[in-house]
Image (cartoon, rainbow, N blue to C red):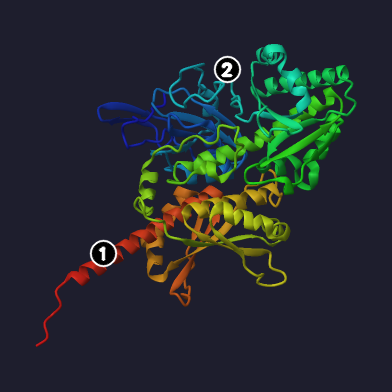
Amino acid sequence: TTAFPDPRSDIFFSPFISAGKVELHGKLIEVEHSVPKRQRSRKLQIRNIPPHLQWEVLDSLLAQYGTVENCEQVNTDTETAVVNVTYGNKDQARQAIEKLNGFQLENYSLKVAYIPDEMAAQQPPQQHPQGRRGFGQRGPPRQGSPGATTRQKPQSDVPLRMLVPTQFVGAIIGKEGATIRNITKQTQSKIDIHRKENAGAAEKPITIHSTPEGCSTACKIIMEIMQKEAQDTKFTEEIPLKILAHNNFVGRLIGKEGRNLKKIEQDTDTKITISPLQDLTLYNPERTITVKGSIETCAKAEEEIMKKIRESYENDIAAMNLQAHLIPGLNLNALGLFPPSSSGIPPPAVSVASAAAAASYPPFGQQPESETVHLFIPALAVGAIIGKQGQHIKQLSRFAGASIKIAPAEGPDAKLRMVIITGPPEAQFKAQGRIYGKLKEENFFGPKEEVKLEAHIKVPSYAAGRVIGKGGKTVNELQNLTSAEVVVPRDQTPDENDQVVVKITGHFYACQLAQRKIQEILAQVRRQQQQQKTLQSGQPQPRRK
């Protein structure tokens, strides 16, 4: 049998290095045959995964290196978790093994090795229905029944939000709340009718918390109640289904050139319109999706619309979870990526990395220093970032507490434009996060394409060596930790302020983490310089003769 590492030991033997038996700390370890180059497959085994890691975080990490066709948890006696992963091709698997072997995740160093094809078939997947070791609770159990090979998705945290005409609220609640109680019981849902919001408004929001199926059933029942009440009160106007959705998800619902929305309309035989962006405010980031059709067709459209919105939410939360625990001192919920009615993001986990990064923040009561970052966006996206009559960029600047300016184009054919963002770390986080989100929302990147941008920060020329490290060690560690590409171009001529450029390319969290780490290095350099000055000023001056 394959031996597993002692979780308390820092020593790891890949089960595929060499054949034979090894004695370690008095224990006999049996090692499988090695994997020759010609037998390297698309399949990997990843060990030493943090026991309470969310599946979404792992999925997001694995997806950075290619298409994950299958991911199974393996039954082990270790405290940490083990999974077998199958990538789309051997190149993707090779890239994953190069990047992930030794990758630090919540203080655990991942161990990755190839699995020969014939071995993968022999290894039993995890079959504990409940209370298993490794991987904390996350809604429906993964591989809950014996023999299951694929996982169920966790229940989404996105509720269904509807807008209903105020005159129908009484009928939906029913006498002494009987009707709404029946709906909640029948659909196993929690339903909030926000009667006190916007006193005198023609419409009231309803929030339904349940499974996707429960939300859809409750929605259909509410539509039927409204139609019956309209007939009883001789209300002749059409009652469309109105769904409220956070603006960050609407771009992906619409799709490139409106393709997603058109497909939903065609498949469900409905007419769908979405309220304009101008109606949004920082305090009300939701847009109204109006669906016209019969109750049956509207119910089908609701299922498809919410499926897309939940998918977008899950993708965003997975990306946020991946490195949220490594960015200290920043309020990730303040970024406004998630609906106020959702649970938001989980609290960041404490890690050595976050404790170290916290060193770059000033003591309590002291204002953080302002930083300047040059973020490069597609030239075609400038209009979307500025907004009509500059409204969007002004609103963004106020929200983030940062100065945001768009530099002139370098030439008529320039494909990129530079956005100059000046402000403290939290302002940088908010401003850059909203810019990344806007580019995704406005479909400047494909629905399955990750938004990756290049950011430049200037560092004093004397500190560039510290960013690079001896033999490039520091910059390599930065890249491994953050998943961003970090480049300090050689042979740079320092500018008039004796500064050189560091280039960072990656998705939002990778880019943010790299920026924070570089700022931490610069803060250390500044502190050391200050200490040297203090020591020098404290030394007695030589007497003149």
Q: Secondary structure at mark 2?
A: loop
Q: Is residue 38 visible?
A: no
- The answer to which of 115 and 12 lies nearer the viewer is 12
- Measured along the vertical axis of the image, is residue 59 above or below residue 470? above
Foreground tag (1 vs 2): 1
Q: Residue visible at 46% across and 29% down?
A: 82
Q: Amino acid at mark 2?
A: Gly
Q: How many numbered badges does the structure rendering display?
A: 2
Residue 90: which quarter of the image?
A: top right
Q: Residues within 10 Å of mark 1 (few under 14, many from 20)?
A: few
Residue marked by disc 2: 147
Q: Secondary structure at mark 1?
A: helix
- The answer to which of 438 and 480 lies nearer the viewer is 438
- Measured along the vertical axis of the image, is residue 320 above or below residue 174? below
In the figure, is residue 15 to the left or right of 252?
left
Q: Residues within 10 Å of mark 2 (few under 14, many from 20)?
A: few
Residue marked by disc 1: 531
Q: Is residue 212 visible?
A: yes
In the rendered image, residue 118, in percent from the top left (x then y), is placed at 54, 28
